[in-house]
Image (tube, rainbow, N blue to C red):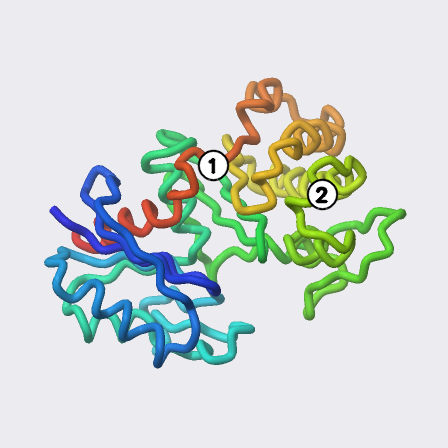
Amino acid sequence: MLYGALEAGGTKMVCAIGDENGKIIEQISIPTTTPDETMPAIIDYFKDKDIKALGIACFGPIDLDKKSSTYGHILITPKLAWRNFDMVGTMKNALSVPIGFDTDVNGSLLGEVTWGAAKGISDAIYITIGTGVGGGIWSNGGLVHGMLHPELGHIKLIKASNDSYKCRCPYHDSCLEGLSCGPAVEERWNAKARELTDKDEVWELESYYIAQALANLILILSPKKIILGGGIMHQTQLFPLIRKKVLENINGYIVTKELEDIDNYIIPAGLNDDQGIMGAIKLAMDADL
């Protein structure tokens, strides 16, 4: 049985065909420009593939309320050409198949809990730290949505006393995304992250912000697993720094087997950067039920 998967990102649209086991049979990448340019190419890719359903894991904010008149739309995104674009309606009209729709980070989380590092776990968090910062929450065996969807990248942090960098976020003066995303690292240190691997001071500060956010999320959500993905987390030297600082932030207040085995609690993504597209396959499978 074949399913379509669309990982809709701000830079590129990854289109794939997969099966019920999460196997990616083929995939292509299409640049994200404007809907008028990008969507016809996406539709052309899927229209002759005989898919049972399509799953879309999409950049946001997006409307996930099926009772809403704008369900399936991209909302007030900084990507101006895509504001108020009807992603679900466009693909449903073109392909006439069931559509599963969620955020890109929820898609990655769904891939991990279905086939990856959080398989079989009832409560988990996935956070991507790259061009932006976003997160998904898996609670009691399901994705959390609420009035919109979680925006973990915009939780407020206490700035480090030695950090004079102005938060990059246009909405907040000290949020996780604005202080720790890839462009913030580049602006603060005048070099791309991959050129700063050996600069300990870069990763001490980066881990300070990430660990502070994770400690807050642990206290609020009590996850059984935390998965960190995205381009910044390819700097694997961050993991031991983050784990150490998380424990310092918790300061012994919580004692669990997970925190005692923190190397297996705060972990990298487990699907070789395919978690997003595999999650989109699962969105399609669920839409076809």
Please state which amino acid type lies under the numbered disc 2. Leu
User: Residue 198 is drawn in which quadrant?
Assistant: top right
Name the element at disc 1: loop
Residue 162 placement, left or right of 203 = right
163 above or below 65?
above
In the rendering, which numbered label is found on residue 196?
2
Is residue 169 or residue 255 the one in the foreground? Answer: 169
Pinpoint residue 4: horizontal percent, then vertical percent: 22, 55
Residue 160 placement, left or right of 151 = right
Pinpoint residue 243: horizontal percent, then vertical percent: 66, 29
Toward the right, the furthest residue is: 162
Residue 5 placement, left or right of 264 = left
274 above or below 102?
above
Pinpoint residue 90: horizontal percent, then vertical percent: 27, 75
Residue depicted at 30% across the width and 56% down the height: 28
Is residue 172 or residue 35 the one in the foreground? Answer: 35
In the rendering, which numbered label is found on residue 269?
1
Residue depicted at 55% across the width and 73% down the height: 78
Please state which amino acid type lies under the numbered disc 1. Ala
Task: Find the distance from the CA under tag 2 to the CA under tag 1.
Answer: 22 Å
Residue depicted at 74% across the width and 58% down the height: 187
How many neighbours does mark 1 have within 10 angstroms: few (below 14), some (14-19), or many (20 or more)? Answer: many
Q: Is residue 68 visible?
A: no
Pinpoint residue 66: horizontal percent, then vertical percent: 32, 67
Name the element at disc 2: loop
66 above or below 270?
below
Front of the two marks 2 and 1: 2
In the rendering, which numbered label is found on residue 173?
none
How many neighbours does mark 2 have within 10 angstroms: few (below 14), some (14-19), or many (20 or more)? Answer: some
User: Residue 253 is drawn in which quadrant?
Assistant: top right
